[in-house]
Amino acid sequence: MSGFDYAEYIEAFNRGDDAALIDRYFVEDFKFIGTTRAYNSRAEFLDFLRWAHDGVREIIRPITVLESDNSIFAEIDMDFVATAPRPDFPFGPLMPGDIKTVKFFVLYALRDGMVTQLKSMTWPAEYHVSKAPMLGSHAGQRAAFHAYATAFSAGDGARFGSYYTDDVVLDLPSAPLLEGRAAIVGFYTAMFERVRETLTINHLVVDDGGIAADIISTFTAHADAPDFQVMPLQAGQAVSVRVLVHYTLTAGRISHIKVARAGQPELHPA
């Protein structure tokens, strides 16, 4: 037997540390052959992975795996989760919050627990793929929450709104309940005309039923906002506040958001 643990490899791949993955699992003279590109060393392949994964998390979801003594053949539904704009992405342009799934067929040649060659073929993006629930405890779903937060911070209502159920409820401190995706996206769209909110995630606790998040919300005024609910702001000023947020998940989407302040607002002068 090759001594190669494919489940362990997938877990390492999905952690997103490309250098550690290459060092642990690929021989020095590793070769990659893909549909449109080929590499003749693991150093070349690492350079490619660093470029491909710039602002994008790649997540393996194996569908079918066939193993022999010295090879593995895998059908994979590969999720690409964007936290930065990637207009040049190989499988089509991505913006923060996007999740694109591509069917891969991969043949791994193995020796002594290491990959010596990888051959990869793909179908067009979203063609005959399975789709995982957007949010939850799996590595890709955790990555998707960061993508959601990035889309929210970018003010992209269409994309961050796609993470909500139709009947989502937002419970903010000292504010009326907002009910429904359209109402919540509309509320933030109006707010972002004067004040943008940036989410900095300190810590997450995640399971398939919900997400508990320790977050710093930073509100930056692009126009005077004397009636802003956190504190009055002049154009150019910003205010940060630590909040604890619980997101209830239903079938992988956010169905309820409860926000509680965990600190006093801190003003940042213009």
Image: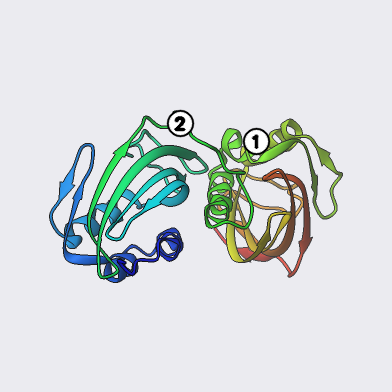
Mark 1 and mark 2 in contact? Answer it, CB < 8 Å: no
Q: Is residue 91 visible?
A: yes
- The residue lying at 69 percent from left, 40 percent from top is 164
- Give the side of residue 248 with respect to residue 69, left or right: right
Q: Is residue 178 above or below residue 123?
A: below
Residue shown at 15% from the left, 59% from the top? 41
Circle 1: element type: helix
Label number found at residue 189: 1
Residue with the mark numbered 2:
126
x and y percent of residue 26 in the render? 25, 64
Q: Quadrant of the C terminus?
A: bottom right
Let me know if residue 88 appears in the view: no
Query: Residue flagged by tag 2: what amino acid is it?
Result: Glu
Q: Nearer the viewer, residue 160 or 89?
A: 89
Q: Which mark is residue 222?
A: none
Q: Residue 224, how many percent across, how many down?
A: 64, 45
Residues 21 and 69: in front is: 69
- Residue 15 vs 39, above or below: the answer is below
Q: Is residue 31 left or right of residue 195?
A: left
Between 198 and 115, the one nearer to me in the picture: 115
Mark before the other along the chain sequence, 1 or 2: 2
| Real-space Cα separation, disc 1 to disc 2, in angstroms | 29 Å
| Count of numbered tags | 2
Mark 2 nearby-residue class (10 Å; few <14, some 14–19, many ≥20): some
SS at circle 2? loop
